[in-house]
Each structure stands twice: as structure tokens, then as C-alpha cells.
Amino acid sequence: MELWDAYREDSTLAGCNLVRGEVIPDGLFHLVSEIIVRHKDGMFLLTQRDLKKPNSPGLYVASAGGSAVVGESPYDAAIRELREETGVETPKLEQIYRCMSKDTIYYGYLCKTNCDKDSIMLQEGETISYLWLTKEEFFKFIESDMYMQSYKERMSEYLNIIR
């Protein structure tokens, strides 16, 4: 059973926990961290979601990411999720967005890395493949039906800056 801290709309702790898979009560939120990985040479890392994932199986996303567990800050969750889903380790992330949906507060980060592109490690049950795309290829790919569009919407402000 995975436990999350419950948050209010203003991102302050609500003083209770949420359980993954259970309905989140109205007025409460959980935190999700998403990390866009951009290589020092300008290429973007996309990962393909496992075919057994309940939401958007098989689609690609330009991020690693997931929910912050109890006691974990959005930044710490981002560092952990990046390492778990890609094997990429970094001492520093740059926050590039914060947005909300019905019951989730999303924190988006940018990881600039110089990792060996062949060293990406996929997490069983989460990811099944990866691609490194140039900026031009990346912008074309995110318009395709192979890309998870909700991720594109959340990172749109960042995308507008780098276009």
C-alpha cells in the first residue's frame, strides 16, 4: 500500500494521508513530480509507458515521474522517480512548472544531463522503451498519437520558451 501526504489547494499539508488507488476526497490533493530530461547536446529523452499501465499504456512521455510518497517533497520525489525510471542521476533539477488538476498538484522539473545515452535503465512495470530525439524531432513527435497529450499540456509553458 502506497501512502501519500494530503495537501490543500495552496500546497500546504492537510494533516492526513491518502492511499494510492482510493478516491481522493474533495478539497484534497496529492503531489506528482514530472521530469523532462534534456541532454547537454540538446536531445530529449522520451520513455514509453508499459503496456500494462492502466492509463495511456504504450504511449510515450517526455518525462519520468510519479507521486510523492509520505514525507517526500516534490523535488525529492523528482530525483527518486528520475533515478527509478531512467537510471539518470543528477544533483540538480530546475523547476519549470506547477499546475493543478482535479485532485493533483503537478511539479515539473528539467534535468540537464550529460549521461551516456545508452545507459538508460527502464523500470519494470513502468517503462518498456526509450528514444532520444532532437529538438525538431521532439516537437514533431509530441503532436503524434503516440504521445500522451496531457503531459504536453502541462509542460506547454516550457515548450513555448524553447521553441
Image (cartoon, rainbow, N blue to C red):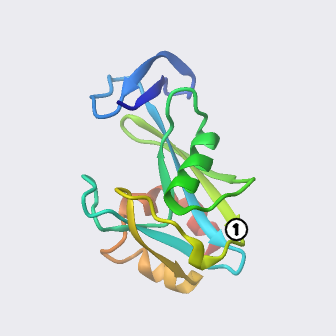
Query: Measuring 46% from the left and 64% from the top, which residue is drawn there?
Result: 122
Other-residue count near label 1 (Cα within 10 Å), few / some / many at <14 / 14–19 / ≥20 = some
Name the residue located 53 percent from the left edge and 50 percent from the top edge.
81
List x then y, in percent, for residue 153. Answer: 44, 59
- Residue at 34% across, 33% down: 20
Q: Residue 123 location in percent, x, y?
A: 44, 59
Image location of residue 140, percent across then percent down: 45, 82
> Circle 1 is placed at which residue position?
113
Secondary structure of residue under mark 1: strand
For the C terminus, the image quarter is bottom right
Q: Residue at x 55, y 85 (%)?
A: 136
Choose top left, top right, bottom left or bottom right for residue 37. bottom right
Residue 23 lies left or right of residue 75; in this view the side is left
- Where in the figure is residue 79, as x and y percent of width and height? 62, 49
User: Image height check: is 123 above or below 78?
Assistant: below
Residue type at mark 1 is Thr
Who is closer to the viewer here, 133 or 159? 133
Please determine whether, in this image, residue 152 is positioned above or below residue 131: above
Give the residue furthest to the top: 15
Q: How many badges with numbers are in the image?
A: 1
Quadrant for residue 130, please give it.
bottom left
Q: Nearer the viewer, residue 100 or 4?
A: 4
For the N terminus, which image quadrant?
Answer: top left
**In the rendered image, which quarter is residue 162 located in?**
bottom right
